[in-house]
Image: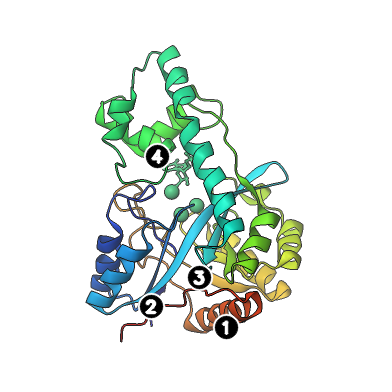
Amino acid sequence: MRIDLHTHSDVSDGTASPASVVRDAAAAGLDVVALTDHDTTLGWQEAERAAREVGIDLVRGLEVSCTHQGRGLHLLVYLPDPTHPGLNDLLGRIVEGRDGRVPAMLAGLRDAGVAIDRADLEREGSRTAATGRPHVADALVRLGVVASRDEAFRDWLDPGRPGYVDRWAAPVTDMVRVVAEAGGVTVVAHPWGRGGRAALPEEEIAVLAAAGLAGVEVDHQDHDDADRARLREVAAELALVVTGASDHHGTGKVDHDLGCHTTDPEQYERLLALAAASAAASGRSAPGVVRPR
Ligand code: AMP
Ligand code: FE
Ligand code: FE
Ligand code: ZN
């Protein structure tokens, strides 16, 4: 059983459609794939159709932009009722925050001598729920200002750079609670990724566990061997599920091929058991895994 629980399509900042991501996952020999676009469930229906076509299990999820103690944090959310009003309220605010800051970003870039307008951006991520920094990065690449998304972030879009503008994200403990109300489960994404261990100190993982967090994404390209070993220990101490995944973004991120990291089948079963318990306790009609075989 090969299980990849973190992928993005072009309804957020991946470069392939939800159907292509699912088909490519099957072609890559995966048995289970989760679609986890940033802050939106827009790709779920298309992904479900493709999963039934090619015969791969599909976990419907999202990756939600959160904050904790003044720092950004990504939360993987699996199998919530997508019609839950509280969940939709928070997601709506995140998406509006991301989209709403684009004019200020473009103004910052213009002041620094790089002229991009809305028309340039509309060519990038035309299906996306919200235009964000990855799409601005793609426009910078297309216009020949930089050679890659990574370079665009480093020189223009990271904090302190001319195109950076802060935006609203959901307080993580609110999000964990709302997802439980919606019958889903939460896993903290790449906790020691770009920000390193300071991004989420170990004591804070315990705080999230106490708030109802189900798991920790351990096997991820942004974690080195020492990080993974320590995160496994932390997860064991807190009885958290351990996951691994590609965080695939199509051609938007290099070295994140589908299935480059996977989740142990036993850990996956634990996660599904927690999701089933959450769905039952919530009284919502949570979607469950699409199992075409
Ligand atoms: P935004 O939500 O508009 O601030 O954009 C943040 C998104 O950009 C994250 O979810 C990442 O997927 C992506 N991202 C952040 N840093 C980088 C980077 N250095 N290279 C490529 N993508 C990045
Ligand atoms: Fe992304
Ligand atoms: Fe992320
Ligand atoms: Zn991701």
Q: CA distance from mark 2 to mark 1?
A: 15 Å
Q: CA distance from mark 4 to mark 3?
A: 26 Å
Q: Is residue 232 visible?
A: yes
Residue that mark 4 sits on: 134
Dot 4 or dot 2: first in sequence order is 4
Mark 2 and mark 3 in contact? Answer it, CB < 8 Å.
no
Mark 3 and mark 1 in contact? Answer it, CB < 8 Å.
no
Task: Establish if 238 lies above or below 293.
Answer: above
Q: CA distance from mark 4 to mark 1?
A: 35 Å
Residue that mark 2 sits on: 290
What amino acid type should be assigned to the residue bearing mark 4?
Pro
Q: CA distance from mark 4 to mark 2?
A: 29 Å
Q: Nearer the viewer, mark 4 or mark 2?
A: 2
Q: Nearer the viewer, mark 3 or mark 1?
A: 3
Does 214 sit left or right of 117 as displayed? Answer: right
Task: Establish if 173 lies above or below 131.
Answer: below
* Disc 2 secondary structure class: loop
Q: CA distance from mark 3 to mark 1?
A: 12 Å
Return the mark for residue 79. Answer: 3
* Disc 4 secondary structure class: helix
* Disc 1 secondary structure class: helix
Display colour scheme: rainbow
